[in-house]
C-alpha cells in the first residue's frame, strides 16, 4: 500500500478521486474548476492559521532599537550534553558583556566592539541576540574563564555534588546524583545519571565534594 494509506488507514484522495465512491468522475473543465476552488480554500485556511499564530507571537514581541555607542549584553548558549531528570536548572539564556555598538547593519543587525579574546567570533549580530544594558557595575559578566566557541556556545562543567539517590525501575536501579553546575546557583542544580557524569567528567566524581557539602550542612 502507499505510505499515506499505511499512516492514515485510508487511500489518498487526489484531485482525480475527490468524488465519493459511486459518484461519476468528472473530467475536463469541471474538474479543473473544482481543483482550483479546493486549492483556494486550502490557501485561505493556511493564511488564517498563520495570521492567528502571528497574533499570538506579536503579544510578546517588543520592538528593540539601539543607537551607536550604546552598550548591550551578548547572548551565549550553554551546552551540557548529558541527560537531565530534574525540572529545575533549564538551560536559561546567559549573557556576557557589556559591549559597545559600533555600527548598525541593516534594520535588525549591529556590529559590536568585541575584545581580542573573542576575535574568532563574527562581530555582527542579530538584534535577538542582544539585550539592553542598564548601567550597573554588578551586571558585568566575566567571560575570561569561559571557553566560548565560534558559534557563541560554551561547555557547562559540574562544580559540586549535592545529593545522591537510587531510582528503582522494574528490572534495574539507576544511580542519580544532584549536580550543581558552574555559574549556576544551588537552586538550579539538576539530577543526572551518575554513569553519564562519570563518562563525560571522569575526574569530577573523585574530588569528594559531596562530603564537603554535607559538612557545610
Image (cartoon, rainbow, N blue to C red):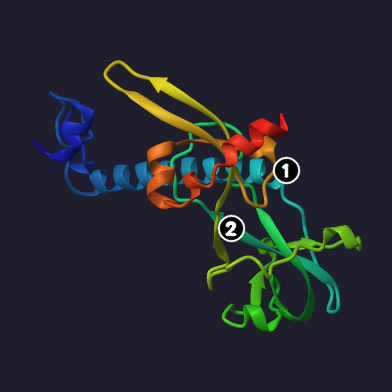
Residue annotated with mark 2: 77
Q: Nearer the viewer, residue 53 or 89?
A: 89
Of tags 2 and 1, the one toward the viewer is 2
Q: Does any portion of residue 161 appear in the rendered image?
A: no
- Judged left or right of residue 159, residue 166 is left
- Residue 66 is situated, as x and y percent measured from the top left of the image, at 81, 70
- Residue 123 is situated, as x and y percent measured from the top left of the image, at 65, 79
Tell me where residue 96 sits by quadrant: bottom right
Disc 2 to disc 1, C-alpha distance: 25 Å
Counting residues from the start of the chain, the first of labels 2 and 1 encountered is 1
- Judged left or right of residue 10, residue 70 is right
Question: For the N terminus, which image quadrant?
Answer: top left
Assign a secondary structure to mark 1. loop
Tell me where residue 147 sits by quadrant: bottom right
Residue annotated with mark 1: 59
- Residue 13 is situated, as x and y percent measured from the top left of the image, at 21, 36
Assign a secondary structure to mark 2. strand
Q: Nearer the viewer, residue 107 or 142?
A: 142
Residue at screen point 54% across, 31% down: 86
Amino acid at each position: 500500500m502507499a505510505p499515506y494509506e499505511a499512516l492514515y488507514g485510508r487511500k489518498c484522495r487526489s484531485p482525480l478521486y475527490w468524488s465519493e465512491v459511486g459518484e461519476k468522475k468528472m473530467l475536463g473543465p469541471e474538474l479543473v474548476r473544482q481543483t482550483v476552488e479546493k486549492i483556494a480554500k486550502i490557501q485561505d485556511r493556511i493564511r488564517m492559521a498563520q495570521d492567528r499564530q502571528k497574533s499570538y507571537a506579536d503579544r510578546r514581541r517588543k520592538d528593540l532599537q539601539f543607537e551607536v555607542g550604546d552598550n548591550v549584553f551578548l547572548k551565549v548558549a550553554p551546552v551540557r550534553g548529558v541527560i537531565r531528570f530534574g525540572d529545575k536548572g533549564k538551560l536559561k539564556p546567559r549573557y556576557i558583556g557589556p559591549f559597545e555598538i559600533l555600527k548598525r547593519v541593516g534594520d535588525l543587525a549591529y556590529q559590536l566592539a568585541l575584545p581580542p579574546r573573542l576575535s574568532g567570533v563574527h562581530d555582527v549580530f542579530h538584534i535577538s541576540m542582544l539585550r539592553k544594558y542598564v548601567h550597573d557595575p554588578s551586571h558585568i559578566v566575566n567571560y575570561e574563564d569561559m571557553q566560548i566557541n565560534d558559534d557563541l556556545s560554551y561547555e557547562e562543567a559540574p562544580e559540586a555534588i549535592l545529593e545522591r539517590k537510587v531510582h528503582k525501575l522494574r528490572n534495574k536501579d539507576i544511580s542519580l546524583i544532584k549536580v550543581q553546575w558552574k555559574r549556576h546557583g544551588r537552586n538550579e542544580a539538576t539530577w543526572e545519571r551518575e554513569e553519564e557524569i562519570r563518562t563525560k567528567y571522569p575526574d569530577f566524581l573523585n574530588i569528594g565534594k559531596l562530603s564537603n557539602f554535607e559538612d557545610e550542612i
